[in-house]
Image (cartoon, grey):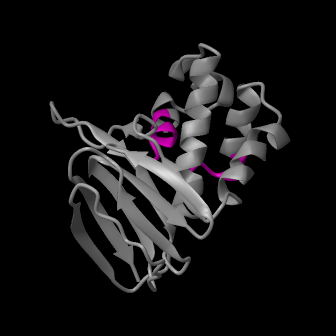
Amino acid sequence: MNEELILLLGDKIKSKRTGKNITLEQLATKAGVTKGLISQIENNRTVPSLPVLFNIIHSLDEDLKTFFEDMHDSFNSSHILIIRKGQEKLFAKETAKGFSYKRILTRTITSQAADVVLLELKKNAVRTKMMSTDAFECKYILKGSIEYTIEKETFTLHEGDTLFFNGRAPHRLRNIGDTEALLLVVYLF
């Protein structure tokens, strides 16, 4: 099962449970599983078996078709993905105090190499020609505001936003802010 589906599944169960004001213990009892298992599923630490998953969905008084319907849309979305600041998903990874993890992006991509770089764009910096790379590109805006054109679409991104796309698509960018912009760039070849 790919990691994207696992993450969507845990998030969906937790969202449905909390939206209906059902406690972990109540859901576990109704589904015939332990509270710990529900917690592990919601925190993306384990994948339930199909019978357990169906029991959980049924225990949430959800229809199977409706439960999975909008999850399908997540996989069929455009080849460009933007995650705006604040849309990151908080998750618990460890019990150490003072650590806060936010998942920005999870995608399953077969790649053989990765290149991680910091890109600084001076004020008014612009690439006038479209270019392409042989990689998937993930750009996290650390500072500033940029405008990104991919094929015929233009996106405005600000500090904290994430852009993910297939770099084979013609693209260019420019700094539209009043200061320099700083981007964390990950190329997946």
In this view, which residue lies farthest toward the top?
21
Occupied quadrant, residue 54: top right
Q: Is residue 22 above or below residue 50?
A: above
Instruction: Name the quadrant of the C terminus.
Output: bottom left
Q: Is residue 132 above or below residue 31?
A: below
Q: Is residue 175 above or below residue 71?
A: below
Q: Measured from the top left, where is residue 108 in percent x and y?
A: 51, 68
Residue 116 located left or right of residue 145: left
Q: Is residue 65 visible?
A: yes
Instruction: Name the quadrant of the N terminus.
Output: bottom right
Q: Nearer the viewer, residue 7 or 186?
A: 186
82 drawn magenta: no
Q: Is residue 87 above or below residue 188?
A: above
Residue 148 located left or right of residue 56: left
43 drawn magenta: yes
Identified at 72% across, 27% down, the residue is 59
Magenta residues? 39-51
Identified at 27% across, 60% down, the residue is 184
Residue 130 located left or right of residue 176: right
Q: Nearer the viewer, residue 81 or 108?
A: 81
Q: Measured from the top left, where is residue 169 in percent x and y?
A: 56, 77
